[in-house]
Amino acid sequence: MATGRTHRPATRSRGIPEATVARLPLYLRALTALSERSVPTVSSEELAAAAGVNSAKLRKDFSYLGSYGTRGVGYDVEYLVYQISRELGLTQDWPVVIVGIGNLGAALANYGGFASRGFRVAALIDADPAMAGKPVAGIPVQHTDELEKIIKDNGVSIGVIATPAGAAQPVCDRLVAAGVTSILNFAPTVLSVPDGVDVRKVDLSIELQILAFHEQRKAGEEAAGTESAAAAAVARNDSAEQGPDGDVPAVMPA
Amino acid sequence: MATGRTHRPATRSRGIPEATVARLPLYLRALTALSERSVPTVSSEELAAAAGVNSAKLRKDFSYLGSYGTRGVGYDVEYLVYQISRELGLTQDWPVVIVGIGNLGAALANYGGFASRGFRVAALIDADPAMAGKPVAGIPVQHTDELEKIIKDNGVSIGVIATPAGAAQPVCDRLVAAGVTSILNFAPTVLSVPDGVDVRKVDLSIELQILAFHEQRKAGEEAAGTESAAAAAVARNDSAEQGPDGDVPAVMPA
DNA sequence: CCATCTTTGTGCACACGTTCACAAAGACAT
DNA sequence: ATGTCTTTGTGAACGTGTGCACAAAGATGG
């Protein structure tokens, strides 16, 4: 019910599987490295190794783009760089705004990987009036009041949110209302957006928690005994006391 | 080339699907928010909405952990917080090291989301001797020479790499050799690690490129003329030299 | 021009993930 | 108790992703 705002389209875009799209930047990076070393052609096997994927998967991925290889030879590096760049839309200029210039926002502004491909930081925006005018990465920070004007004047369609969690949804709403249709969210919150708007999230805390899960499994792999003894291999801390439904919680994160 | 070092185990860990593990931190965050508001119980429908997922998916995810709900009522918030925390291994202390204290590394060191759950920043490590002793986020930066000693003295099993791309693999090798078995990689490189070591990567540039792909699709949904004509002409030409060589980005970030 | 060799492109089978739909389980009122 | 109502837990169908294995395509050499 109340599906005015959906969380994910998740639909396959124009025949190219989502999983393939997510790997194209990986291939592009490997190909660019080969291009700089003036390597003329590369086989699926070599390129797959460089990108860290299975060679059959790579060939299938490329087959969605078209038949760009030559049997018996491999792929032309320069040609493939161009085709993938074009498919990803990197042959055009993408102005982006970064909202929330704290530690992370500033780091993003300074990150070379943004500007190096089609992405150009059009503006840095922060809610703190004291930040206004202060240059970060050579770009003066502007106040949130200017957000709508900045988006429209620069034709920005991609926004990066690096605000605290509480500010993320309001900022997101304003970005979308002003015309942004793609959002990269670094704030630890689930964003609600209307249909037609893409959201990708990067969550440092979640990544660590996933690692911790596997780490715990590894630690308890050989210690086969009671479940509380399983974690004893590495950890000295075990406050886990399983009980009835109403027992005491132990952790209090934010 | 066949490598002795695999890139992904990808195997289901102990019955809990990988996709489910990746969502547990999301549920935990939503539950923690409810817990702070002293909400006693929550239905799968409500919690799913808060976490931005389908309710059937949420129930199936929880079913892998056990039967922790009460039919007709829902889930006990506190109990579920505890169960998920335990499953993720957050009831124990995880010392982590951050290697590479540049803009991003410093932002990570200051990031509250790390310390707020079981994760403790045990050390900050950088290759620049000028950084040594300088405090970042209240923690003095140590030189790379100390890496092995730090890992062993603190029993660190999780490492975060925030170095430039070129330094990432050597740093990774040293971390692994010293005993680290889980790595969170922010450097734009594919890392090779031995079996038994987990790597998760966070790549800002890749996320933006994926957004650009979908953005381009949205924009080109109705207008399909101008540039695709030139691209189509190029597409049937298999020479190594393609059109105006300036249109190929051919750039590589750090 | 033919034979041989390399490497692509893909059909197929299988594994994984998602969603629907519903029976079973319990709460609650009468 | 009995019936009704709510919500979980899960079987089953479906969709997506992965990897093997091999025929087809082209290069290369005699």
Image (cartoon, coloured by chain):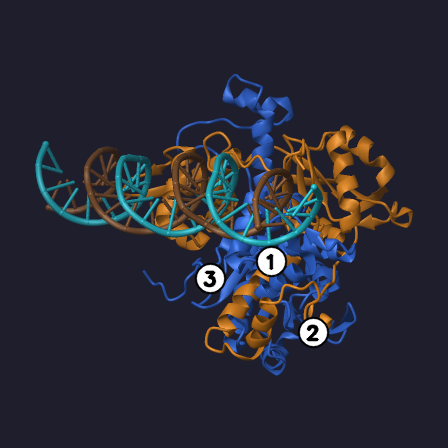
Chain colours: A blue, B orange, C brown, D cyan
Which label's residue is closer to the chain start, 3 or 2?
3
Residue A13: give its label: 3
Whether residue B167 is situated above or below residue A29 in the rendered picture: above
In the image, residue B50 lies at what x, y percent?
A: 43, 54
Q: Quadrant of residue A153?
A: bottom right
Q: Residues within 10 Å of mark 3 (few under 14, many from 20)?
A: some
In the image, residue A56 lies at what x, y percent?
A: 55, 44
Residue at position x 75%, y 73% from top? A139
Q: Mark 3 belongs to which amino acid?
A: Ser
Q: Residues within 10 Å of mark 2 (few under 14, many from 20)?
A: few
Residue at the outermost right position: B130
Say which of marks 3 and 2 sits in front: 3
Q: Which residue is mark 1?
A: B207
Q: Residues within 10 Å of mark 1 (few under 14, many from 20)?
A: some
Q: Mark 1 belongs to which amino acid?
A: Glu
In the image, residue A71 lies at what x, y percent?
A: 59, 50
Whether residue A5 is situated above or below residue A209 in the rendered picture: below
Residue at position x 83%, y 49% from top? B135
Is residue B118 or residue B248 the one in the foreground?
Answer: B248
Name the subunit of mark 3: A
Q: Are marks 3 and 2 in contact (CB under 8 Å)?
A: no
Say which of marks 1 and 3 sits in front: 3
Q: Mark 2 belongs to which amino acid?
A: Pro
Name the subunit of mark 2: A
Name the subunit of mark 1: B
Q: Which residue is mark 2?
A: A129
Is residue B74 or residue B38 the one in the foreground?
Answer: B74
In the image, residue A20 lies at what x, y percent?
A: 53, 53
> What secondary structure is found at the residue carrying circle 3?
loop
Say which of marks 2 and 1 sits in front: 1
Which quadrant of the figure contains the N terminus of chain B?
top right
Distance of label 3 from label 2 (alpha carbons): 41 Å
